[in-house]
Image (tube, rainbow, N blue to C red):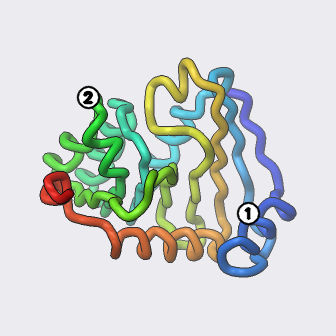
Amino acid sequence: MKKRTLFAAAWLCAAGALAAGPMPAVGTVEVAFTPWDDAEGAVLRAIKASRKTIYVQAYLLTSRSLAKALIEARQRGVAVEILTDREMLAKGDNSQIPQLAEAGIPVRLEVRYAAAHNKILLIDPEESDSAVITGSYNFTWSAQARNAENLLIMRDNPALAAAYLKNWRRHHDEALPYPEGLSTP
């Protein structure tokens, strides 16, 4: 993977202005473009480095490698929670959500939106060395191998991580518990 670490002053300030006002331009950004770069490997390394919490928002999660890494994180004591789009889960034959829930990871289903299209992982967002992972990259094999996708891993920006965590919690509060939420029209 071509690993590019950049200082992201303009991007981080622009992202902050959309949700919570301007944010300090601190930290680094790792960029990956599929299918050329190993975006999945970058996500797996970030999950492996987690120490306390991982919050996931997934439109679609079919990657067995990613599911395995989240389960392993939970087994080593990291608190993992997942939000996912109910309609994509209901349509998807290869979703890893049932296996993740079976492993004891709390899952909630987003139902309010036409598409809960976020693709986000927050790694230790309440710590100073947090990571915010986002981009067009779905958590699927196709996103790595067949699609043209982008992935950003923004590290060491507490204000950015706090804004993303606040938004994640807002979505969590509106979501329904899995699996009960599957049968709710």
Residue 112: x, y in percent? 38, 64
Residue 169 versus residue 116 in the image, above or below: below
The residue type indicated by label 2 comes to Asp
Residue 119 showing in the rendered view = yes
How many residues crowd mark 1 within 10 Å: few (<14), some (14–19), many (20+)? many
Q: Nearer the viewer, residue 125 or 77?
A: 125
Element under disc 1: loop
Question: As drawn, is 105 to the left or to the right of 174?
Answer: left
Q: Which of pointers 2 and 1 indicates the residue nearer the eye? A: 2
| Tag of residue 27 | 1
> Which residue appears farthest toward the bottom when viewing the image?
21
Residue 126 showing in the rendered view = no
Which residue lies at the image location 81% right of the left edge and 50% below the top edge? 6
> Which residue appears farthest toward the top when viewing the image?
146
Residue 9: x, y in percent? 84, 64
The residue type indicated by label 1 comes to Gly
Element under disc 2: loop
Residue 94: x, y in percent? 28, 29
Residue 170 versus residue 90 in the image, above or below: below
Which residue lies at the image location 26% right of the left edge and 57% below the top edge? 107
> Which residue appears farthest toward the right when viewing the image?
10
Quarter-wise, where is residue 62 in the image? top left
Residue 120: x, y in percent? 51, 54
| Tag of residue 39 | none
Q: Earlier in the sequence, mark 2 or mark 1?
A: 1
| Tag of residue 93 | 2
Residue 147 versus residue 171 in the image, above or below: above
